[in-house]
Image: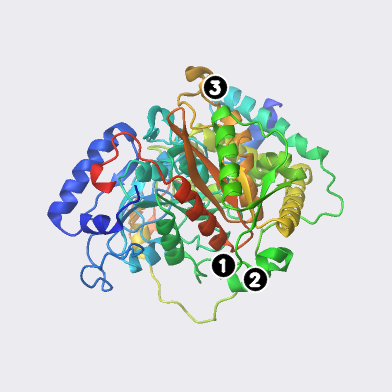
């Protein structure tokens, strides 16, 4: 059941086709709340690169519609970041990653819902309602790129862009039964991505086939003069990851798995065992590895991420754009009221935490310590990649959980529990490594996904294994998936 | 955590919290800070801090002026303008 890209390429070709497409998507979106803004007309004008109908080349992006997470700038569309504080803001520019996809012929059709400023694992922290999982409307789509993952899973777009700071592309992809790629840090320009944690985040892609993930990544990646942290693979000294140095050409042979009890929900544990079985059957050697710093990854991640967030979100003050209170005595009060009214609870929590860990007197104890442990995490992973070509890990310890927090009882995860569960995904962000979430099975009727992690710029290994896993279990289609995209 | 600690932190973060928020956010902040203290279990001697996972050096572009003026478009998003100035309440 792979997407027929050539069918997608015809969706935007005429006003009539765009109109019927819009009707289908809007109808479906009434229940899912995926799009904060949806308009296939806005970006429909052909670029100079368009030249006739493509001859059914499955990896061509020409005229393919895609959605963009609403913390990534697209000129002419709003840029809300899921927050009230950016009320009314229309982006005056377009992110480099999006520009490159447009140059390849793809077209933005809408902006997707997200946890506010990328802060969350459920897309319940949006100021504009939460996005539901197309597999089960009582469950979350995951976060923070829940809108993008749900859009793809529901067959509204063939691919969508998200951002991954601590797992925000991979976890929703796993929850929704699609592929989610977190590229190597710096592989894709962050110009146009509203910054949350600058040393951790990267623009990623969600799609229903590996072919499309690879094509989109290929179009987006590459150093960009507008982002000083972006780079080409050739610029990096890969000797630290000795096996990774031969990344581009080397064939994957050995896969690392974590030793011990990982504290997984039964559905995830079954999917994990199933993946290992499939890999063994296909001739891969499975090696148990130990990452001693894994149990500290979450406090380290949240210390660093919140510290960086407190700095990055200081710019939102109601003065130059966005929400501004009707009345304030002076500019200082204006700023304080705007931020109190404009930021949601989760954002306030993280800004306060970040401010706290950076306070003089506390910096050494928290922030500096976290950065040192971050080095230890990188060292652990470099050591692991001396033994193995890829690491297989869960994306999240549970399947898509029920929405509604405490009200939903045991089946839901409260915000603290959601954070602690980030341990499998935030590891890659701390070390800047690429990782891919892929669907493995349906457990209790909802998708179970796994995650593969590779050395820097070894995305090819992820695609190679991803394709093999796709042969075992292609992305499944949820209820009400449009027949024409099957 | 002392309420005064939270007040000072909120002050530094330029956010005006309401009374009820001091309660709820206070508890959440406390829970996370306590969770962070787990990091004290790690022996960090000899470890350099990582500020950037993969970047090794500063990268400069050629010293040539760029042709890029978003100024007017940016000003369109301002809540209140007077000529090309953004209007704010009196400082004094």
Say if mark 1 contacts mark 2, CB within 8 Å. Answer: yes
Q: Tell me, for residue A305, which label it has, or none.
A: none
Q: Nearer the viewer, mark 1 or mark 3?
A: 1
Q: What is the chain letter for disc 1?
A: A
Q: Tell me, for residue A228, which label it has, or none.
A: 1
**Residue A481 drawn above or below residue A413:** below
Question: CA gap, disc 3 to disc 2?
Answer: 46 Å
Residue A144: % across, % down: 48, 41
Residue A288: % across, % down: 72, 46
- Total labels drawn: 3
Residue A52: % across, % down: 20, 71
- Near-viewer residue (A250 or A41): A250
**Residue B61 drawn above or below residue A107:** below
The residue beneath circle 2 is B58
Q: What is the chain letter for disc 2?
A: B
**Residue B41 drawn above or below residue A99:** above
- Near-viewer residue (A436 or A430): A436
Disc 1, SS: loop
In the image: residue A333, left or right of residue A392: left
Q: Residues within 10 Å of mark 2 (few under 14, many from 20)?
A: few
Q: Residue at x 48, y 32 (%)?
A: A400
């Amino acid at each position: 059941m792979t997407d027929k890209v050539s069918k997608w390429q015809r969706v935007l070709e005429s006003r009539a086709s765009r109109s019927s497409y819009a009707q289908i998507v809007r109808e479906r979106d009434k229940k899912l709340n995926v799009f904060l803004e949806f308009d296939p007309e806005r970006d429909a004008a052909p670029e100079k690169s368009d030249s006739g109908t493509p001859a059914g080349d499955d990896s061509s992006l020409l005229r393919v519609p895609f959605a963009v997470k609403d913390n990534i700038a697209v000129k002419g569309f709003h840029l809300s970041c899921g927050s009230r504080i950016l009320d009314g803001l229309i982006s005056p520019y377009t992110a480099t990653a999006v520009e490159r996809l447009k140059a390849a012929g793809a077209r933005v059709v809408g902006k997707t819902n997200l946890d506010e400023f990328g802060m969350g694992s459920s897309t319940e922290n949006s100021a504009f309602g939460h996005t539901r999982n197309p597999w089960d409307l009582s469950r979350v789509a995951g976060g923070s790129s829940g809108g993008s993952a749900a859009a793809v899973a529901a067959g509204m777009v063939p691919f969508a862009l998200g951002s991954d700071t601590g797992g925000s592309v991979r976890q929703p992809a796993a929850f929704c039964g699609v592929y989610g790629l977190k590229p190597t840090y710096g592989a894709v320009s962050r110009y146009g991505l509203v910054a949350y944690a600058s040393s951790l985040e990267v623009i990623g892609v969600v799609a229903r086939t590996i072919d499309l993930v690879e094509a989109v990544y290929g179009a987006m990646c590459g150093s960009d003069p507008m982002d000083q942290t972006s780079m080409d693979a050739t610029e990096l000294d890969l000797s630290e990851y000795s096996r990774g140095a031969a990344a581009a050409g080397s064939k994957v042979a050995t896969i690392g798995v974590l030793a011990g009890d990982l504290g997984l929900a039964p559905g995830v544990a079954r999917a994990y065992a199933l993946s290992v079985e499939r890999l063994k059957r296909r001739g891969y050697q499975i090696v148990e590895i130990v990452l001693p710093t894994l149990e500290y990854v979450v406090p380290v991640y949240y210390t660093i991420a919140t510290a960086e967030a407190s700095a990055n979100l200081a710019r939102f003050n109601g003065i130059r754009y966005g929400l501004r209170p009707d009345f304030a005595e002076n500019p200082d009060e204006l700023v304080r009221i705007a931020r109190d009214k404009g930021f949601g609870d989760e954002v306030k929590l993280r800004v306060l935490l970040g401010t706290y860990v950076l306070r003089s007197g506390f910096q050494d104890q928290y922030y500096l310590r976290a950065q040192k442990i971050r080095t230890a995490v990188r060292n652990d992973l470099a050591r692991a990649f001396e033994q193995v070509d890829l690491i297989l890990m869960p994306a999240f310890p549970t399947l898509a959980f029920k929405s509604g927090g405490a009200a939903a009882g045991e089946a839901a995860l409260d915000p603290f529990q959601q954070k602690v569960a980030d341990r499998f995904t935030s590891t890659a962000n701390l070390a800047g490594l690429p990782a891919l979430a892929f669907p493995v099975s349906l457990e209790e009727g909802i998708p179970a996904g796994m995650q593969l992690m590779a050395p820097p710029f070894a995305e090819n290994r992820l695609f190679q294994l991803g394709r093999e896993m796709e042969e075992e279990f292609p992305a499944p289609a949820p209820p009400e998936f449009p027949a024409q995209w099957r | 955590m002392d309420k005064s600690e939270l007040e000072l932190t909120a002050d530094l973060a330029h956010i005006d919290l309401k009374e009820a928020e001091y309660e709820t956010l206070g508890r959440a902040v406390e829970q996370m800070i306590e969770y962070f203290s787990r990091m004290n279990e790690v022996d960090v001697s000899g470890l350099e801090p990582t500020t950037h996972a993969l970047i090794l050096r500063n990268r400069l572009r050629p010293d040539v002026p760029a042709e890029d003026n978003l100024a007017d478009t940016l000003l369109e998003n301002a809540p209140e303008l007077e000529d090309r100035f953004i209007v704010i309440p009196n400082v004094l």
